[in-house]
Amino acid sequence: MNYKSDIEIAQSKELKHIYEIAEKAGIDKDYLELYGNYKAKVNYNLLENLKDRKDCKLILVTAINPTPAGEGKTTTTVGLCDALSRLGKKTMIALREPSLGPVFGIKGGATGGGYAQVVPMEDINLHFTGDIHAIGAANNLLAAMIDNHVYHGNDLGLDTRKITWKRCIDMNDRQLRFIVDGLNGRTNGVPREDGFDITVASEVMAILCLSRNIEELKEKLRNIVVGYTKDDVPVTAGQLKAERAMAALLKDALKPNLVQTLEGTPAFIHGGPFANIAHGCNSIMATQMALKLADYVVTEAGFGADLGAEKFFDIKCRAAGLKPSAVVIVATVRALKHHGGASKNELGTENLEYLEKGIPNLLKHIENITVNFGLPAVVAINRFPTDTDAELDFIRQKCKELGVNVALSEVWAEGGEGGIELANEVIKLASSDNEFKYLYDLDEPIVSKIETIIKKIYGGDGADFAPSAIKDIQRLEANGYDKLPICMAKTQYSLSDDQKKLGRPTGFNVSIRNVKVSAGAGFIVVLTGEIMTMPGLPKVPSAEKIDVDPAGRITGLF
């Protein structure tokens, strides 16, 4: 049987004018800045005018550790939102923006799938409204000003061996991870080791997502630590007088982007991909706007709950004072069998043995959400035609033992109609009070906070700190940065820092090789294992399938 591709489904739907979507959300057209007929930025002054309204229910969608078998987190998020709309609830989505690197690399697109998508999907997956480009420009302006300062006398005494600020580009390009620049004579700069991060891993992205107005944006940019002197004294973007120009580049990017689902539910898409190497949440501004406009807001965090959800709670919710009402944990039978050791060819065949070995991954995430963060949860099984009743019943029974229900999600094939069961469970969970709590206290030492995450969220025994990481921590403590939350950079494929350890591994330590401060964003980044802040392209990148015809019609995105 032939199925329409995601892009074919999206292109077959007649979209509503963005004015109509804004009216549905309760946004006056005077606050809109149109990017064609189907996209608009929303002026951040709207948030100021809505500040006295009570926040509505906030629902987080997260998932098990991702696998090649697929989970469908964004698809579930969109379908759930459309299902809530079908049940008569005023609903909005607050999603993260796709990044070009994965779109052209391994993912091929990130706007949901099937009949549960945000549209126009081609625009959203490509340049959209230029937010990520603006972030890259601001990041690289600061990089240029750093090296220009060094070239013209280095009055601040920056040690070129201790410059921590990297350049960035929104593309997976391993060739740029480690470079040497400033070569071929004095007029071309000061030679030094340098490197690129992917744009969405830039601290500027996190700052954009965690800022609620222009003044807060400038303050956070001012606090960016770009490097250190020979005596380990931090040098900031403010000392380079860079923050005002950077903010000027970001003034439009700070405004949330309004689009729609295939069923016409209003959606904010703004910032925040990559929870494995960044904080992985969409903007506070978009989330808070939505919370003032709707009855239910559905948002998502990147990758598995060990990364995205933990950062959503401990970084974003703490920074913005958000209190979630319920959590959806997405899983598939196929993915759980992969965690249990099944090969690709075995995923479509009933096998309770593989499922029993793999389901502890899901159960650990449930435990984290309900016990460590004190929130009610439901498991959404993104259903495939090959799933058997015996496999589904097995998952239901195991989840029930932890006091959590399972809802089947068939939104890929049926849109909002396929998410009604899930939506009803979410409404039920969100209707009661919860005991939401953070994982750790900010006053705890840096080492203690890191080990708490490893032991409580990952299920590990502790951390192995490289000598360089110990020196990093000592430097942060000496400069007063020890009271910040932790942003762990770790593989998304495993609860451990070893992507090959599937399921629910035990008896492991997490290797900590580097610890650095994102003082502007307000957190400490901890690099573990072999995680890279600049991904590479796969052997056969998705870019090979993407094309455009003479009429400008995009194909190959999925």
Image (cartoon, rainbow, N blue to C red):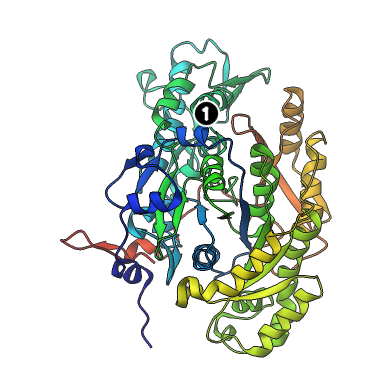
Provide residue 67's location: percent of width, then percent of height: 58, 69
- Residue 72: percent from left, percent from top: 53, 68
Task: Give left or right: position of 325 versus 343.
Answer: right
The amino acid type found where label 1 is placed reads Leu
Can the viewer see residue 161 in this picture?
no
Residue 233 locus on image (x, y percent)? 66, 18
Residue drawn at point x = 46 percent, y = 72 percent: 415
* Image x and y of residue 441, in percent: 80, 39
Q: Residues within 10 Å of mark 1 (few under 14, many from 20)?
A: many
The residue at the point 72 percent across, 59 percent down is 496
Question: Quarter of the image containing the N terminus?
Answer: bottom left
The image shows a total of numbered marks equal to 1
Residue drawn at 58 percent across, 45 percent down: 278
Q: Secondary structure at mark 1?
A: helix
Quarter placement of the C terminus: bottom left
Q: Is residue 166 above or below residue 554?
A: above
User: In this picture, is 501 found above or below 383?
Assistant: above
